[in-house]
Image: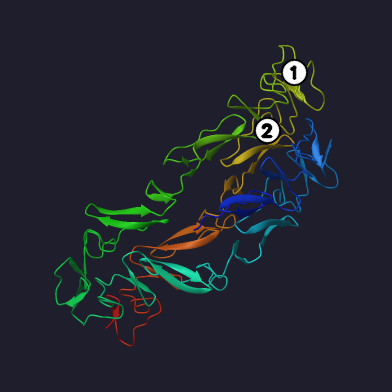
Amino acid sequence: CGHACPAPLGSTPVCDEGSCAVACDLGYTLCEGSCVNVENDPTRCGGCNVACDLGQVCEQSACASGCSGGRTNCNGSCMDTSSSAVNCGECGMACPQPANSTATCTDRVCGLTCVEGFDLCGAACIDTSADAQNCGGCNIVCDMPNNGTAVCVDAKCSAVCEQGFALCGTACVDIAVSRAHCGGCDKPCATGEVCDAGSCNTNCTTGTNCAGSCVDTQADPANCLGCGNKCPSVVNGSAVCTASGCGFECDDGFSPCNGACIKLDDIDNCRECGVSCDSAPNASPMCGASGCTISCNAGYDTCSGDCVDLASDPDHCGSCTGVCSANQVCTSGVCTSTCPSPTVNCDGSCVNLLTNPAHCGDCTTGCTPPANSMPVCAQGICEFACTLPYIKCGTGCIDTTSDPLNCGLCGTACPTLPNAMPSCSASQCRVTCDTGYSLCGNRCVDTDIDKVNCGQCGLKCKGKEDCNAGQCE
């Protein structure tokens, strides 16, 4: 469960007999496993095997010398930046495309359209019949008990308890030590009694008396090595307590790294914590299934592990083994004596200084893009285009599906609540309550002592009653 198929640009994810596949969206063509827009792709202009010559652009499925009709030259593609979801408002400004959606651009402003069966909630497309953050409607957040997980089933909130805990009302409790549910749900101990191994007694015969519960302080993360000593919570993991003190265990699919639980699938932590992927000339570093790799920039091909421009590299002119003589230059993959206009000779390579990211503006200026992007040379000025799912936020490329400082949209920071840690998942802000706290109505509270949520969310103590160990007394 939870294995969502990715949605590359121009495609809709498909699950076919247990394997992820893609179906190209309207206007895109399947070329060697990728969905491309042959109407404006200079490497596949009008067809999968049609590449434009050096200096040309692709406009309306045909190679041309320049863009017309108010369209903008975006790295060889003639784009309408008022409606292009990958160049919305300017070249390289890709619109966010969260799961179960199609990115749109209208009048230079990004938007999205949800697929059938999903509703637009904030910046995400949600199945409100099954999402605990939007259960039955947008922003209807299910309460999440301590030692449990909130779930939404048929648009109704419920909870699933961790192993060893029982669902009593809306709370997940350990009936072996709970004063309010000692030995079973709704079996409270009397005032002054403690819950000891599922029985109400006057004193603890096992464990330590912590507010009426006889607990093992070498195993209870809410009372670790001492009553009230709560272990720190961790996003995408659970706090644990041992004889050595507090620790944590990560959820499936996440690994411990520098005190956090993360997916080891980015260029800073590739398959191992702290293993960063190095950059390479004319390429972007990537984290693949078996470790670090590189992806050649647009217009470059791999030759013996290096990314080279077969159209202009005199040492790889036209092919990996094509070498021009000392007095020749390489243009359009052919060795010749001079460079045709508008290209110039840069160390034997005939390049267009207005569009070549390795020689942008002059022969010595190479564009250096931020992480998770590819370099772009626009009219002799270095820019960059982010690689999906990353989008351009200021001067960097951010994954707005998981970044708590840019959740769903650039600049949308998830709020920090008392007794909680913010996180971002599937383009939505989420809350992870500290150990021993439950999420009740968008607040993290200790149901052992909270008079408004005593023992479980929504249970209020009457009059002068106090809440002690989850019981109104």
Q: Which of the marked residues, 1 or 2, is nearer the chain's N terminus?
A: 1
Residue 157 position, x and y percent, is 48, 73
- Image coordinates for residue 137, horizontal then vertical, percent: 57, 73
Residue at x 25%, y 76% (from the top left corner): 182
At 56% from the left and 40% from the top, the residue drawn is 371
Q: Is residue 114 above or below residue 14?
A: below
Q: In the picture shown, does residue 132 fall above or below 61?
A: below
Q: Mark 2 is on which residue type?
A: Pro
Residue located beneath label 1 in the image: 329
Residue closest to the eye, 21 or 206: 21
**Residue that appears at 40% across and 79% down:** 458
Q: Is residue 259 left or right of residue 133?
A: left
Q: CA distance from mark 1 to mark 2?
A: 19 Å
Whether residue 218 can be seen here: yes
Q: Residue furthest top?
A: 326
Q: Residue 197 sits in which quadrant?
A: bottom left
Pick whichever, 218 or 379, lies toward us. Answer: 218
Residue 87 sits above or below residue 222 on the image? above
- Of residues 316 and 106, the one nearer the viewer is 316
Instruction: Judge depth for marks 1 and 2 and give the one in front.
Output: 1
